[in-house]
Amino acid sequence: MTHPDRRWLWLVSGITLAFLVRGSIVLAKLDSLDADPDAYRVIAETLAQTGTFGLMGEGEVANPTAFRPPLYPWLLSFFVDNDGHLASGWVAMLHVCLGVLTIGLTWDIARRWWSDRVAWIAASLVAIDPMLLWQSTLVMTETIATALTAMVWWWWVARLNPNPGAVKLDGDERINSCDLSPSRPIIDAVVFGGLLSLTVLCRPTFLVWAAMLIPALFFVGPSCRIRRVARVGVVGLILVATVGLWTLRNVTQLGHPIWATTHGGYTLLLANNESFYDSLDEPSGSWLPWERTPWDPTEFFAEYEARERGDDEVSDDRVAYEMARSTISNRPAMFAWSCVVRATSLWHPFPARTPDRSMMVILSIGIYQSGMLLFAVLGVGRHWRLWRRPNAWPVFALVITLTAVHSVYWSNPRMRSPVIPMLAVAVACLVVPKKADRTTTT
C-alpha cells in the first residue's frame, strides 16, 4: 500500500507527465486540427455566430441540421472567437484536457478495483496508446467519447458499486438500509443518468450501451431493492428526457422526429453497397495482416453523388437507407459475410496499408495493439472470478455494443477507441497474482 502523501506526489507527477505526452503529440500535429472531415467545426462556428445548430446556406443563412450529434460541436462552439473562427489551439487544449481526464479516470478505476500498481500500468497504457494519440489530433469525437465512457465507468465503480462485497446484509438489514442516507442514491442516479445521456448526445451508438447498463443497475450496489428500482427508473427517465428533447428540437427545426442524426443512412450505405460487396468477392491479395489494403470507395462515391437526392437532409438520409436496404435484401449472403468483415475490421490490430503509412508505422502500431488485445483477454481469463462481477459489466456491454452496431454500420479500428481504457485495465491486472481472487473484492 502506497503512503497517502507519496500517492499524491506520484499522482501530480503522473498528471504532469500525461499533459506533456498528450500536449507534445497534439502540438506536433496541430495542423491536422485545421481539417474538418466530419463538419463538426463548421457546425460549431455556425452555432456560435447565429445561435442555430446548423450549416451556413446561401445568403449566409443558417440552416438547422441534425447531420451530427449535438454534444461535440456544442462544446466546440464555446471556443469560437468573435470573428466566428474556431482556432485549432483551443481544440488542441480541449483534447489534451479530455485525454488527461481519461488517463486519470482509468488510474482511479484500476486503483479502486485492483491496486496502485495496476492503476499506474493501466494509466500509462492509455497515455501512450497510438490510437488515442492519433485521434486527439483530429476534429472528431473519439477523444470526447473515450472520456465520457471512462466517466460512466468511473461513476459505476466509485459511486454506484463502491467496495462491492464488503457490505453483506440479510433480508431485514437490507430493508432497514432504506432508511439511511435517502438522498445519496438518487443523486448518484441523477449524475449517472446525466453522464449516460451525454454519451448518447456524443454518439447515438451509446444508446445501445445505455440500454444494457440501465437494467443492470438493479443488481449493483448495497442499496435495498426499493432504492435499486428507483435508481433504474431515475436513470431511465433522464435518458428518455434527454433523447426526447433532442427529438423535439428536430421536430420543431426540421419537421421530423429524428432521435439520433440524419447521417445514419449514409453510414449504413457506406457499409452495404454494391462496390463494397463486390470487393469482398475479389481475391484479398496477401494474407499478412500488415499487408491488407482498404477498400477503394471511388466507385461508391461516384454512385452516391449520382443518386436521386431527397428534398432535404432528412429525406436524403431516407434515400440512403433505402439504397442500403435494397443492397442487403438483394445479396443477403454477402450481407452476412460483410458483418463478419466489419466486426473483424473493428478489432483488427494492424492499420490498413495506405501510401501515407510506412511499413515501420504499421508494424509498430499493429504489434502494440496485438499485444493489448491478447493481454486483455489473458487478464480477464486469469481473473475471471473478478471480471464476471458487476464492475466489469460496463466493459463487456461496451464491447458487445460496438461489435454489434459496427458489424452492420460502417466500421474501422478508430471506432473502438472508447473501450481502450477498459482494455488497459484488463491488461494491467495481469500483474496481480491469481490467488488474489480469494481476497480482492470487486
Image: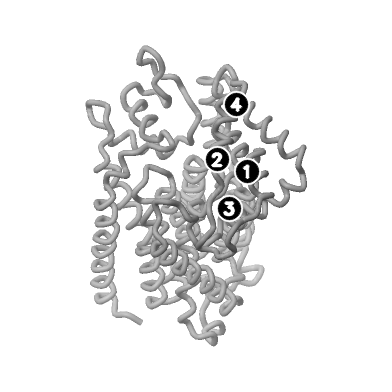
- Viewer-side label of 4, 3: 3
Mark 4: secondary structure: loop
Q: Please name the residue shown 50% across and 85% down the image.
A: 433
Q: Is residue 129 above or below residue 136?
A: below
Mark 3: secondary structure: helix
User: Which amino acid lies under the numbered mark 4 shown in the image of this protein?
Assistant: Pro
Residue 194 in view:
yes
Mark 1: secondary structure: helix
User: Which residue has dot 3 on it?
Assistant: 402
User: Which residue has dot 2 on it?
Assistant: 297
N-terminal label among 2 and 1: 1
N-terminal label among 1 and 3: 1
- Residue 263, given in percent of the width and then of the height, sits at 55, 33
N-terminal label among 4 and 3: 4
Residue 156 as seen in the image, left or right of residue 17: right
User: Which label belongs to residue 276?
Assistant: 1
User: Which label belongs to residue 371?
Assistant: none
Residue 212 as seen in the image, left or right of residue 151: right
Q: CA distance from mark 4 to mark 3?
A: 25 Å
Residue 275 as seen in the image, left or right of residue 129: right
Q: CA distance from mark 2 to mark 1?
A: 7 Å
